Amino acid sequence: MPKLLTASATETQSPLCQFTQPTHNESEGQQVPVAELKARCDRYYDYLAALQPPQENTMLRAANFTVASILEMLQESPQSNFIRVYYGIKENGEHELFMAPITADGIPDTSEEAVYADDCCACPPMSNCSNDEFLSTL
C-alpha cells in the first residue's frame, strides 16, 4: 500500500504552514489505499462535471513536472522550506500549474536567482496522462 506524507497528528492541533518555524511542519507517512486517492480525484471530476456548462474535459485535473526541473528548483532554493503550486491560465487560454519556492516569510521567492518549475503537460487533454488510474472515469 502506498505511503502518503501528511501533517503529523500533533500538527493538526496547531496552525499548519508555519513558514518561520519549519520544524513545526512535520509530516508523517501513513499507509493509504489507492482507492482513497482515486476517490479524491473522482470527487473533483464529479464537481467539474456538475458545473454549468460541465468542465470535466476543460479544467486541469493533473499536471506533470519533470523531476529535473523540481530538483533544480530545490537546489537553487535551499533556504525555502515550502513549495507552492499555482494554478494559472496562459494567454492562449490553456490551463497550467507551476511551482515556486516559498521563503521563510511565507511569500514566493521573486529574487533574480529564483527558479520556478512549469508543468510540462497537463491533463486534460487526457492523451497526456493515458492509463492514469487516478484520472480514469470508468
Image (tube, grey):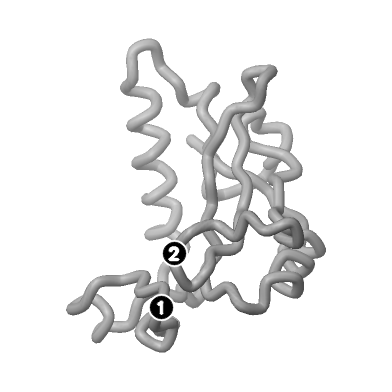
For the point 43% across and 46% down, which residue is it?
Answer: 41
Q: Quadrant of residue 79?
A: bottom right
- Residue at 44% in and 82% down: 22
Look at label 1 and name its amino acid. Answer: Thr
**Residue occupied by mark 2:** 106
Task: From this view, report whether residue 25 is shown above or below residue 72.
Answer: below
At x 73%, y 58%, the residue is 115
Label located before the other in sequence (1 or 2): 1
* Circles 1, 2 touching at the beta carbon (< 8 Å): yes
Q: Using the numbered discs, state the Cα–Cα distance from disc 1 to disc 2 in whole angstroms.
A: 8 Å
Give left or right: position of 122 versus 52. Answer: right
Q: Amino acid at mark 2?
A: Gly
Q: Is residue 75 left or right of residue 20?
A: right
- Image coordinates of residue 120 in percent, x first then y, are 75, 43
Q: Which residue is mark 1?
A: 20
Instruction: Assess disc 1: are there few (<14), some (14-19) or many (≥20) residues with their C-alpha within 10 Å of its C-alpha.
Output: few
